[in-house]
Amino acid sequence: MADQDPAGISPLQQMVASGTGAVVTSLFMTPLDVVKVRLQSQRPSMASGKCLLYCNGVLEPLYLCPNGARCATWFQDPTRFTGTMDAFVKIVRHEGTRTLWSGLPATLVMTVPATAIYFTAYDQLKAFLCGRALTSDLYAPMVAGALARLGTVTVISPLELMRTKLQAQHVSYRELGACVRTAVAQGGWRSLWLGWGPTALRDVPFSALYWFNYELVKSWLNGFRPKDQTSVGMSFVAGGISGTVAAVLTLPFDVVKTQRQVALGAMEAVRVNPLHVDSTWLLLRRIRAESGTKGLFAGFLPRIIKAAPSCAIMISTYEFGKSFFQRLNQDRLLGG
């Protein structure tokens, strides 16, 4: 098959395998992401009784409460969270168990295509870099991972912004077109990529570190076995280790992304357009001044608890899917 990559499967089959992995991962990991974002969106001081923004998992969509005291219970901040387990208990107690998976359908709409693009682009870029000897085999995963994530973030950012407007302002799909045209008229096409900077600063280094460590750990676990014979178990372990390392090193940028989304969402709630958007570095300094160095690592435990199994589940499901399609293609060739 001419359109197959060196692993023996086509880009379309790679997208199906990665999309399946995204669905499985989201179902298991969304509750941990909900807790992480809720912890990160807390500020040192908040007026009691104020109706607050509610954020939830994976791609962190925002939900606003426009009705003050008439808000539903889950829109309100029942109390401050003191830690990961405290957040789990209080969210379930005050908002119900379903809250841990709230927004999952809308999140999947974004996560599945983004993951499919990302993983397929990574494999294709790595094969291209190694095949053309543009970089060494050691650093090819790092370069391919960074480029694949940068491209994915750039493509998905406008779609994520539109989804946020749908959920935050409760506009119809027909009204959304008018909102987008107004935003472009006021701020130009760049306004569709608000939040791109901190997202890229978090995701691109994460991706580079993740794939670099993943290939190293996988190679170490495999010994002298060929790369295309990696077992699902080895992929699971390698994905968990590499995801944990990358998550720790990029956590401050994750905190910045969450707080920027909360701030922009709050302005949209009162129909105020920000005069300027603070730079990522300024936000890092502000968080450190308000909450200390500990504030830069808010949500540490849920992010780490989430990173290891989510990366492990995602990559092992993806590798299993690729192995399935490899066998399928081989059977077709033998049968033909």
Image (cartoon, rainbow, N blue to C red):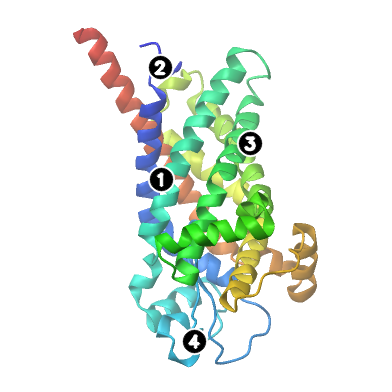
Q: State whether residue 87 is above or below residue 321.
A: below
**Element class at badge 2:** loop
Label 4, secondary structure: give it.
Answer: loop
Q: How far apart are marks 1 and 2 (CA)?
A: 22 Å
Mark 2 or mark 1, which is nearer the start of the sequence? 2
- Which label belongs to residue 78? 4
Q: Quadrant of the N terminus?
A: top left
Mark 3 to mark 1 CA distance (whole Å): 19 Å
Image location of residue 292, percent across then percent down: 76, 71
**Image location (x, y in percent) of residue 46:** 64, 86
Q: Distance between the residues labelled 4 and 2?
A: 54 Å
Q: Which of marks 4 and 3 is nearer the N terminus?
A: 4
Label 4 vs label 3: CA separation?
A: 40 Å
Amino acid at circle 4 = Pro
Is tag 3's residue or tag 1's residue first in the polypeptide sequence?
Answer: 1
- Could you tell me which residue is drawn at 56 percent across and 63 percent down? 301
| Label 4 crowd bin: few (<14), some (14–19), many (20+), radius 10 Å | some
Circle 1 is placed at which residue position? 112
Answer few, some or many: residues within 10 Å of disc 3's Cα (few below 14, many 20 plus, some between 14 and 19): many
Q: What residue type is labelled 1?
A: Val
Residue occupying image coordinates x 23% and y 14%: 332
Residue with the mark numbered 2: 4
Instruction: Give the class, few, some or many, for how many residues have Cα within 10 Å of label 2's Cα (few <14, many ≥20).
Output: some
